[in-house]
Image (cartoon, grey):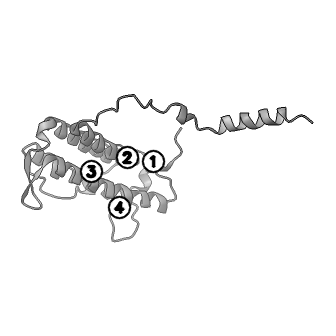
Amino acid sequence: MSKSPFLAAALFAIALAIPSHAQDAPKKDAAVKPADPELKVVVDSWNDIGRKLIAMAEDFPEDKYDFKATPAQRSFAEQLLHAAGANYYFINPVMGKQPPAEEDMKRDKYKTKADIVAFVKKAFADGAAAIQSKGEKGLNAAIVDPFAHQQVRVLDYAYGFIEHCGEHYGQLVVYYRLAGLVPPESRPKK
């Protein structure tokens, strides 16, 4: 019995097992891309968490918008309103305005899912515009944090609000799961 067909099949199987990305690896002599400018990185980070919260706001069923994980917690709608509304504690000082008078936007002012989706979209668009308005050099400009009554750099303050929204994103994932739903980011990509 000849071993040639078996050997050929084994070599073919090995060739298929070699990761295709190894063939696409950059050449060792290729120049490394430089880091993106800080402005691009912070705007991309801001927009990414905004995209996730907007996707949730658009996706979650309107009849579940007042769902609470426990009676003491905010509803799904109130979580979105809080995260988006809190962004104005960043946006307003960056734009030279006073921070909002109230920390949480009231649910009775935003009665429908469409109202909330529009507010979340606006808050993230306004935040991205505020960051971009500072330019690369303006990211290190000092503004006053209205909570700490301390000067902070725009860049540091932006990342604090990105992180704040990320915390609420994580809480909203739990709301999805408790409601028997799968969050948009956890669904298989098409």
Disc 2 marks which residue? 52
Q: Toward the viewer: 148 or 16?
A: 16
Gap in angstroms between the C-alphas marked 3 and 4:
21 Å
Disc 4 marks which residue? 75
Gap in angstroms between the C-alphas marked 4 and 2:
18 Å
Q: Is residue 171 above or below residue 31?
A: below
Residue 185: give its label: 1
User: Residue at (16%, 50%) from the top-left corner?
Assistant: 90
Gap in angstroms between the C-alphas marked 1 and 3:
17 Å
- Label 4 CA crowd tier, 10 Å (few <14, some 14–19, many 20+): many
Q: Could you tell me which secondary element the residue under label 4 belongs to? A: loop
The reply to whether the C-beta atoms of the residues labelled 2 and 3 are less than 8 Å apart is no
Of callouts 4 and 2, which one flags the residue occurring earlier in the amino acid sequence?
2
User: Residue at (18%, 40%) from the top-left corner?
Assistant: 131
- Label 2 CA crowd tier, 10 Å (few <14, some 14–19, many 20+): some
Q: Nearer the viewer, mark 4 or mark 2?
A: 2
The amino acid on which the numbered mark 2 sits, given as a three-letter code, is: Lys
